[in-house]
Amino acid sequence: MGNGTSIGRVRGLGSAHSGAHHWIVQRVSAIGNLVLTAWFAVSLLLMPNFNYITVHDWIVSPVSAVALSLLIISVFWHVRLGMQVLIEDYLHEAGTKFVALAALNLVVFGAAFYGVFTIARLALGAA
Amino acid sequence: MAQGATGKKARPLSPHLSIWRWGPAMFTSIMHRVSGNGLAVVGLGALLCWLGTLAAGPEAYAKYAAFAVSPLGRIVFVGISWAYFNHLCSGLRHLLMDIGGGFEVKTNNMWSILTHVFGVLLTVAFWAILLLR
Ligand code: HEM
Ligand code: HEM
């Protein structure tokens, strides 16, 4: 391993042994998104109107509540991976990159939990 | 970095940041990134707000619903739906290319362009059904 040019510093190190998993999970979540968001789009079109009662009655049915919760999980997982790539592509300084990735993880986890929690609250009759 | 003329003959250069031209695939790649990240921020924000106001009760939900049909709300939701359908189509193109399809230049350019055509058509169809039902 040389230490002069940037290519010299990485030559001979071999693979990072991570990355393929990220790529595959991005695809798996993409397929999950495809199925669940298509279901959601069709469900919106099938609603007679978007009044509180109509939407509330729709969302508290077990099928809707479960599918919408799965949608939240699949989409946020996909977004967590996708935005990680965005950050890695544009933030090159180790400190800012670390902070941005940490913030991404916290926001995604919190937001996804908020989504599933509101659905559960509605479906279990507390709101 | 890329030094082409160190030997006697100029060696081929690797792709260079300042030497490029527009092509359908490049545009589609950029739009996939823009639509995906736009959806993540605005689309998921709006989705969570919808769930949040629904859980907060009829008064809060009514405010959200009123915003959704206001002129600004229309722009936001048409934008979200277009980003979604566009990302869906370019995402399917990604999955097709992942299994080795569509790499010939002509086919690749064709699917790149069709991605955006289908994205707009699906958006128009979605709103037509929604508003005319
Ligand atoms: C509807 C089905 C969907 C499909 C088929 C799909 C497909 C894909 C694929 C294959 C990638 C990887 C692209 C690459 O490796 O360069 C990707 C990236 C991404 N997707 Fe999706 N996706 C879908 C829905 C969504 C949704 C609903 C969101 C957000 C709410 C989203 C956000 C993103 C983001 C942020 C990226 C990263 C883009 C980048 O910066 O490179 N996707 N999508
Ligand atoms: C693009 C993103 C968003 C848009 C367009 C949006 C829009 C709105 C609008 C128009 C209202 C009604 C405000 C009023 O007239 O009083 C509202 C209220 C509300 N939003 Fe959002 N919002 C977004 C993101 C979020 C997010 C991410 C959350 C939660 C995590 C959220 C939670 C709430 C809640 C709980 C209320 C109800 C407040 C009340 O009780 O009146 N919003 N939002």
Image (cartoon, coloured by chain):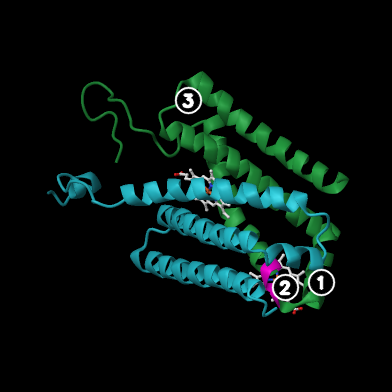
Chain colours: A cyan, B green
* Towards the viewer: B10 or B21: B21
Q: Is A52 placed left or right of A109 in the picture?
A: right
Name the residue type under label 3. Answer: Gly
Residue at 60% of width from left, 72% of height from top? A120
Query: Which residue in the protein does label 1 denote?
Result: B63
**Given contact means CB atoms under 8 Å apart, are the residues at marks 2 and 1 in contact?**
yes
Question: Horizontal and vertical percent for residue B78?
Answer: 75, 50
Residue A48: quadrant of the picture: bottom right
Query: Which residue in the protein does label 3 denote?
Result: B102
Residue furthest to the left: A1
Q: Chain of mark 3?
A: B
Query: Which residue in the protein does label 2 denote?
Result: B53
Name the residue type under label 1. Answer: Lys
Circle number at residue B105: none
Question: Horizontal and vertical percent for residue B20?
Answer: 48, 32
Name the residue type under label 2. Answer: Thr
Range of residues picked out in magenta: B50-55
Q: Is residue B110 visible?
A: yes
Residue B68: quadrant of the picture: bottom right
- Distance in Å between CA atoms under marks 2 and 1: 8 Å
Specify the quadrant that holds the C terminus of chain A: bottom right
Q: Is A57 placed left or right of A79 in the picture?
A: right
Report helix, strand or loop for mark 1: helix
Report helix, strand or loop for mark 3: loop
Residue at 86% of width from left, 46% of height from top? B133
Residue at 72% of width from left, 78% of height from top? B56
| Mark 2 or 1, nearer chain start | 2
